[in-house]
Image (spheres, rainbow, N blue to C red):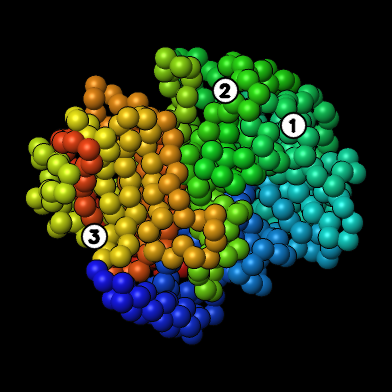
């Protein structure tokens, strides 16, 4: 394409973006959005309007998955932090609810967690109607102070009452935040892990009633200390019939692709102290996601035993540019919910992630291609039929003689997002340098990668492509890359490619995905 044509196309795209943005504003009806704005994700959760960042208070209660999130009810920039709220019965379709915990006076509602107090240890409910209890950080705007507070609900999270004895934990510190509370069954007690961000530490506290807390121990500094520590998580997980504990600490900046990211430690927890199994040297870390847009990950509490999964999601953005992304009426979104397991590899115990199986109900038309040679500059027959802004693709490659092999998605005449495997360096990457709008931040474009060894000479890629994101799960979720993108709507093509030599496409399946916002009526069971 000539330079003049490229420029003309670029101008047309920008004009279209402006018109669409203005149209998106005009089409809002009350609090119900059209969910057809330019760049609006169609199978990832995003707020109806305004700003969002960290997921908060993920808990399953009375048949519903609750998703609370950091939210500015008054604008598309960070501020007036409150807890937004949505619920789902299937982890796919979401119903927006009213703000759960608003900013009050000079105290913002920062990040935290929620529990289903099934034993009514707090005394806020009854045995027949146990409460939901939210534990969150009160961030004072009139002085440098953060403390821990609680609120409770007796109507499945629809209305909330602040505990009159707040704060329940106050050390008089300016940076002391993001409590994650879990039930520790052997001790029949609640355990809180909370961050001391600038000290690269987390503290553990215990309580019998969620109102009175006593210090147990500290952990850190350890792993990555390239940025402040925030948004911890703590949970047990079984591997080979043995219980281990995972401690998650989000770090900003200092992630492998720059800016915000999430690290984890695997070890033991005896109800008082966390001890990592694998000692890490200075600066070493186990990263949950090697992409640019995965932060403040939190797992759901109280998943039923008959389900047995550990499920989490994260904020799909990066503090380097989250306030500048080219959206109007809303800003930022969440990753898809993912199942998390722990597997033993030669290098040690590692987390493995996959999209929750419930997302498969969004699959529409299927296209399959198998047994194709992939050579430099050669179009692979059948792949050109795959088109769309919302796709699920599962592809397996024999690397062969290729230096690089992979897929180009959201491809147009002048845009593409490259998901490739560097066979020489054994690294899986996403290159979004020409993915669409990249001009809003110098930290946005680039190639971001993580280590992934082939298995028997093969690499398996599982892609979820939405209107403004790509999530890549390599070799069954052993390595994950999460990236936001902002392409033009007409960039909807897919290519398979190889460079430096021949490879083989063993198999490829692709599905066009439906929107979750073709939603059932309010009050109707999503997914029913």
Q: Is residue 57 visible?
A: yes
Q: Nearer the viewer, residue 424 or 472?
A: 424
Q: Nearer the viewer, residue 387 or 496?
A: 496
Q: Which residue is mark 3?
A: 493
Q: Position of residue 406 (x, y in %)?
A: 26, 43
Q: Which residue is mark 1?
A: 201
Left or right of residue 135, residue 27 in this image: left
Q: Which mark is residue 266?
A: 2
Q: Residue at x 38, y 33 (%)?
A: 427
Within 10 angstroms of label 1, few (less than 14), some, or many (20 or more) residues?
some
Q: Position of residue 515 (x, y in %)?
A: 34, 62
The part of the image, by quadrant, that contains residue 422 is: top left
> Which badge, 3 or 2, is on the more N-terminal residue?
2
Q: Position of residue 214 (x, y in %)?
A: 83, 30
Q: Position of residue 361 (x, y in %)?
A: 29, 51
The part of the image, by quadrant, that contains residue 178 is: top right
């Amino acid at each position: 394409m000539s330079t003049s044509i490229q420029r003309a196309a670029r101008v047309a795209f920008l004009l279209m973006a402006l018109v669409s943005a203005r149209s998106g504003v005009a089409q809002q009806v009350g609090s119900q959005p059209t969910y057809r704005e330019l760049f609006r994700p169609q199978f990832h959760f995003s707020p109806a309007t305004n700003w969002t960042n960290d997921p908060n208070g993920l808990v399953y209660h009375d048949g519903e998955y609750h998703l609370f999130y950091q939210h500015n009810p008054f604008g598309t920039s960070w501020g007036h932090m409150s807890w937004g709220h949505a619920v789902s019965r299937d982890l796919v379709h979401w119903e927006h609810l009213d703000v759960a915990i608003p900013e009050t006076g000079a105290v913002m509602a920062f990040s935290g967690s929620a529990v289903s107090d099934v034993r009514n240890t707090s005394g806020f409910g009854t045995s027949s109607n146990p409460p939901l209890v939210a534990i969150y950080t009160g961030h004072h705007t009139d002085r440098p102070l953060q403390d821990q507070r609680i609120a409770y609900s007796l109507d499945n999270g629809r209305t909330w009452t602040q505990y009159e004895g707040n704060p329940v934990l106050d050390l008089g510190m300016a940076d002391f935040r993001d409590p994650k509370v879990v039930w520790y069954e052997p001790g029949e007690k609640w355990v809180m892990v909370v961050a001391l961000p600038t000290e690269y530490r987390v503290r553990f506290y215990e309580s019998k009633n969620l109102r009175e807390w006593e210090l147990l121990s500290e952990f850190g500094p350890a792993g990555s200390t390239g940025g402040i520590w925030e948004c911890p998580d703590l949970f047990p997980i079984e591997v080979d019939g043995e219980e281990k504990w995972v401690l998650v600490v989000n770090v900003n900046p200092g992630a492998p692709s720059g800016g915000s990211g999430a690290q984890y430690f695997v070890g033991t927890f005896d109800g008082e102290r966390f001890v990592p199994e694998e000692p890490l040297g200075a600066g070493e870390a186990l990263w949950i996601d090697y992409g640019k847009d995965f932060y403040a990950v939190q797992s759901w509490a109280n998943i039923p035993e008959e389900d047995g999964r550990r499920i989490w999601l994260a904020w799909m953005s990066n503090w380097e540019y989250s306030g500048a992304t080219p959206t109007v009426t809303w800003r930022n979104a969440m990753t898809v919910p993912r199942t998390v397991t722990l597997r033993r590899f030669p290098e040690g115990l590692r987390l493995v992630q996959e999209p929750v199986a419930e997302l498969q109900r969004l699959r529409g038309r299927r296209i399959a291609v198998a047994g194709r040679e992939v050579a430099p500059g050669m179009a692979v027959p059948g792949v050109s039929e795959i088109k769309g802004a919302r796709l699920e693709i599962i592809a397996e490659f024999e690397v062969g003689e290729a230096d690089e092999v992979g897929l180009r998605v959201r491809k147009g005449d002048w845009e593409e997002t490259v998901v490739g495997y560097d066979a020489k360096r054994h690294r899986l990457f996403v290159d979004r340098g020409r993915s669409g709008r990249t001009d809003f931040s110098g930290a946005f474009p680039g190639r971001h990668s993580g280590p992934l060894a082939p298995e028997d000479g093969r690499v398996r890629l599982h892609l979820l492509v939405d209107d403004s994101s790509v999530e890549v799960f390599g070799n069954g979720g052993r390595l994950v890359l999460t990236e936001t993108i902002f392409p033009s709507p007409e960039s909807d093509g897919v290519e398979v490619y190889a460079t430096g030599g021949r490879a083989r496409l063993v198999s490829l399946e692709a599905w066009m995905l439906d929107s979750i916002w073709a939603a059932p009526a309010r009050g109707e069971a999503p997914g029913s």
